[in-house]
């Protein structure tokens, strides 16, 4: 088993599949009266969060607790290089406390890579800057597989602000590893340069959502921050919604079986209308539940081999 | 003062001969009491001249001082370095440039020539007192806001024109600031994969294109700092073909390293302009050989440990380079000694109007020279650097060539590979 999960690229197909299978076993546990496994008893998992992200932190916390680990929440928001402790000093502190795993959310891309050089325990990337969010990709893949029965050959559109999205990068890497065909959709200003060469040569890019929808099994909408229009990535929220938002009319262009996903938090009315978000095709609430199972599987497999 | 006899030295890799140093100058015969230096196997180069050094004093003496930077330079084979103006306070007045110049004289290891800021506080709003710096004891001729681009086209035009009065030259850090807001590394495949904000090549090329046109329009000299892209080379090639008075430099690291190194997220590889692609490196090497790029300049940029031992986005950009510049150039160009002398000594001295440096070892010339053992190989160990900082990207790399001795006006600053003081 790998030691760290810093990027979805750390996972080859057998490892990723093992995590998804394990997540399935963890999900079965959620139906039981006693939801706890003793596996990580006596082990310490630190949630080191440099950004507010209640949903991700709670998800990791629930995952670690269901595995009987001791959980320490370290909210480091506001501490930066100029004020407060450096990441290295924080890492050495956690190291001294005997952290077996550090789950890190950080505004700077690559912070988990730096952290891994300074601690002996496992590092799990819970979102770093505009880089990656690999456990989100795992829970998304798990959700797709649960709903559609497979990943190999699945056609997935990821729509919106790909440039600033860590979810998109991790999803492209993981889905491609597992045999899915990914199409990135958005205005050209929000599609990063050389994306196919950077992540996977099979990745397709389209600027036209309507032409893509009829061929998709999964349409994943990304959060788009309205502030992006201040930087001229697009002219207005209204124009963005008109060209790239998912509403009922567009959803009807999708095949009958196709599902709608969103990593949350949503901007209802911006990239997705409430009718679509709340429809039976939407997996948004399921994704949250699956997040705990996927993160349990990751912690279980990263830490389970030891002690 | 002591006389020296360099026995059996190879001048620029050519004929072996004895070279005498008497009263600080090259002489045709040595007195009987001359100290004999066995120079068998060593190549003599005119002392290297660096047009782009950050010595950090005043202001960041924890990262480097004029003295430690001078020692680093001497160990790298340099006899003159030009100290960039982005100190604290900024070198934008006669007082500050004279202070730096005096500190250089006191250290006595290389000639430290201050570069003056183009604009007050490097703020890009108002011209600094360029004339006062030019007529100061520091005798400033190169002006640069390095670290910042003189982005305002009208201000750049005025600066180019104004320094004609004393044959000054503007050294531009070519970076269109609106295109590089938040930029962390070269914009391309690797930045996309790493999720780091891109620094597009066009941000450099657009400013160089504008500036060569401005320099042409007002008939002034322009020097372009640390050229990093293949596109910039093409802009320079066209401008030179038209007769624009433009010169350009490239750093050793842009001749050797690529953006793939950022994949480690280790900020020792963070530099501005950023490391580019392999095809840019190839174009820069060809341009240096051809002369489209005139010189190698180090952009020696020392940084304290805490400014590099952190997240990539929070780290300061820059690499130390004085002690590894010649070995890197040797590894890139091979033992083309005359070309190396041209790109690292003669031409930089000529661009700067610096007399007494960049001259070949002819009788009567000041004895500013360095002796290199081209057969030696060295594994770079950051802890062995004389610089106060350790941010070298070459840790663990084996590089060819060892600087055995350096002479500044006939006085050894380095002997047996060690600084004399």
Image (cartoon, coloured by chain):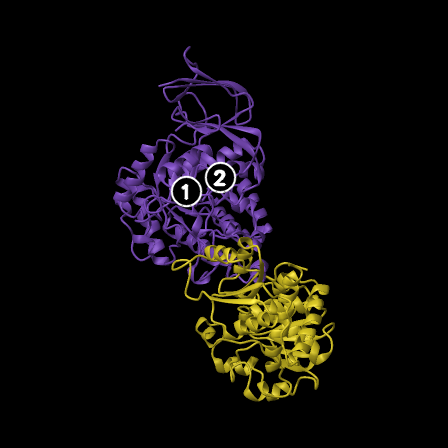
Chain colours: A yellow, B purple
Q: Position of residue A52 (x, y in %)?
A: 47, 71
Q: Is residue B204 above or below residue A153?
A: above
Give the numbered dot on residue B73: none
Please report the residue visible at 73 percent of the width from the left and 64 percent of the height from the top. Answer: A14
Q: Mark 1 vs mark 2: which is more N-terminal?
A: 1
Q: Is residue A205 visible?
A: no
State the CA–CA distance, disc 1 to disc 2: 20 Å
* Extreme-top residue of the structure: B32
Q: Left or right? Give the position of A231 relative to B257.
A: left
Q: Is residue B207 above or below residue A245?
A: above
Q: Secondary structure at mark 2?
A: helix
Q: Is residue B115 visible?
A: yes
Q: Which residue is mark 2?
A: B383
Q: Secondary structure at mark 1?
A: strand
Q: Nearer the viewer, residue A196 or B388?
A: B388
Which quadrant does the C terminus of chain A fall into?
bottom right
Q: Nearer the viewer, residue A71 or A2?
A: A71
Q: Position of residue A194 (x, y in %)?
A: 60, 63
Name the quadrant containing residue A152.
Answer: bottom right
Q: Position of residue B149 (x, y in %)?
A: 40, 54
Sort mark 2 into few (<14), some (14-19) or many (20+) by Cα contacts within 10 Å.
few
- Foreground disc of the pair 1, 2: 2
Sort mark 1 into few (<14), some (14-19) or many (20+) by Cα contacts within 10 Å.
many
Q: Which residue is mark 1?
A: B53
Q: Are marks 1 and 2 on the same chain?
A: yes
Task: State which chain disc 1 sits on.
Answer: B
Q: Nearer the viewer, residue B221 or A135?
A: A135
Which quadrant does the N terminus of chain A fall into?
bottom right
Please report the residue visible at 40 percent of the width from the left and 24 percent of the height from the top. Answer: B365
Number of disc labels: 2
């Amino acid at each position: 088993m790998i030691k760290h999960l810093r990027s979805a690229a750390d996972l080859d197909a057998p490892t990723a599949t093992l995590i998804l299978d394990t997540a399935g076993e963890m999900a079965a546990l959620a139906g039981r009266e006693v939801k706890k496994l003793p596996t990580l008893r006596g082990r310490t998992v630190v949630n080191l969060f440099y950004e507010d992200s209640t949903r991700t932190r709670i998800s990791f916390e629930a995952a670690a607790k269901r595995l009987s680990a001791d959980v320490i929440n370290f909210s480091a928001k506001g501490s930066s290089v100029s004020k407060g402790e450096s990441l290295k000093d924080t890492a050495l502190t956690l190291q001294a406390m005997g952290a077996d795993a550090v789950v890190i959310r950080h505004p700077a891309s690559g912070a988990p890579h730096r952290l891994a050089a300074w601690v002996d325990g496992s590092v799990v990337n819970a979102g770093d800057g505009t880089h990656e969010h690999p456990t989100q990709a795992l829970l998304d893949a798990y959700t797709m597989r649960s709903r559609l029965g497979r990943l190999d050959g699945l056609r997935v559109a990821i729509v919106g602000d790909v440039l600033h999205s860590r979810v998109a990068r991790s999803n492209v890497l993981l889905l491609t590893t597992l045999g899915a065909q990914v199409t990135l959709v958005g205005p050209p200003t929000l599609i990063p340069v050389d994306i196919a060469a950077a992540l996977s040569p099979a990745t397709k890019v389209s600027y036209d959502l309507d032409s893509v929808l009829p061929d998709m099994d999964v349409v994943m909408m990304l959060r788009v921050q309205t502030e992006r229009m201040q930087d001229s990535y697009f002219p207005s929220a209204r124009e963005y919604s008109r060209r790239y938002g998912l509403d009922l009319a567009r959803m009807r262009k999708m095949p009958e079986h196709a599902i709608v996903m969103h990593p949350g938090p949503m901007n209802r009315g911006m990239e997705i209308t409430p009718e679509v978000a709340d429809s039976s095709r939407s997996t948004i609430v399921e994704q949250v539940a699956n997040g705990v199972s996927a993160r349990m599987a990751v912690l279980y497999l990263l830490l389970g081999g030891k002690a | 003062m002591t006389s020296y006899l360099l026995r059996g030295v190879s001048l620029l890799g050519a004929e072996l001969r004895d070279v005498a140093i008497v009263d600080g100058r090259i002489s045709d015969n040595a007195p009987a009491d001359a100290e004999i230096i066995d120079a068998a196997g060593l190549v003599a180069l005119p002392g290297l001249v660096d047009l782009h050094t950050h010595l950090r004093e005043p202001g960041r003496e924890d990262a480097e001082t004029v003295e430690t930077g001078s020692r680093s330079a001497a160990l790298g084979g340099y006899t003159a370095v030009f100290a960039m103006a982005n100190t604290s306070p900024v070198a934008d007045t006669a007082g500050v440039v004279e202070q730096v110049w005096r500190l250089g004289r006191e250290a006595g290891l290389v000639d430290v020539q201050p570069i003056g800021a183009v604009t007050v506080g490097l703020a890009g709003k108002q011209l600094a007192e360029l004339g006062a710096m030019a007529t100061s004891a520091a005798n400033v001729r190169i002006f640069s806001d390095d670290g910042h681009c003189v982005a305002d086209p009208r201000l750049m035009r005025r600066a180019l024109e104004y320094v004609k009065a004393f044959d000054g030259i503007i050294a531009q850090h070519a970076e269109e600031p609106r295109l590089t807001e938040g930029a962390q590394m070269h914009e391309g495949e690797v930045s996309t994969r790493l999720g780091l904000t891109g620094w597009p090549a066009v941000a450099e090329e657009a400013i160089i294109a504008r500036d060569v046109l401005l320099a042409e329009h007002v008939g002034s000299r322009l020097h372009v700092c640390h050229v990093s892209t293949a596109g910039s080379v093409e802009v320079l090639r066209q401008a030179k073909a038209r007769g624009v008075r433009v010169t350009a430099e490239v750093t050793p690291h842009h001749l050797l390293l690529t953006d793939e190194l950022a994949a480690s997220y280790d900020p020792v590889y963070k530099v501005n302009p950023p490391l580019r692609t392999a095809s840019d490196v190839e174009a820069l090497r060809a341009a240096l050989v051809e002369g489209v790029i005139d010189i190698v300049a180090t952009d020696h940029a020392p940084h304290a440990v805490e400014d590099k031992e952190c997240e990539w986005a929070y780290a300061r950009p820059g690499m130390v380079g004085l002690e590894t510049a010649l070995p890197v150039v040797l590894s890139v160009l091979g033992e083309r000694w005359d070309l190396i002398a041209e790109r690292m000594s003669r031409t930089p001295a000529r661009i700067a109007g610096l007399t007494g440096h960049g001259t070949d070892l002819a009788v009567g010339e000041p004895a500013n020279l360095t002796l290199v053992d081209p057969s030696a190989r060295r594994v770079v160990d950051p802890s062995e650097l004389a610089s106060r900082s350790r941010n070298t990207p070459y840790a663990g790399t084996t590089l060819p060539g060892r600087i055995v001795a350096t002479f500044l006006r006939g006085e050894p600053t380095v002997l047996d590979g060690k600084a004399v003081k």
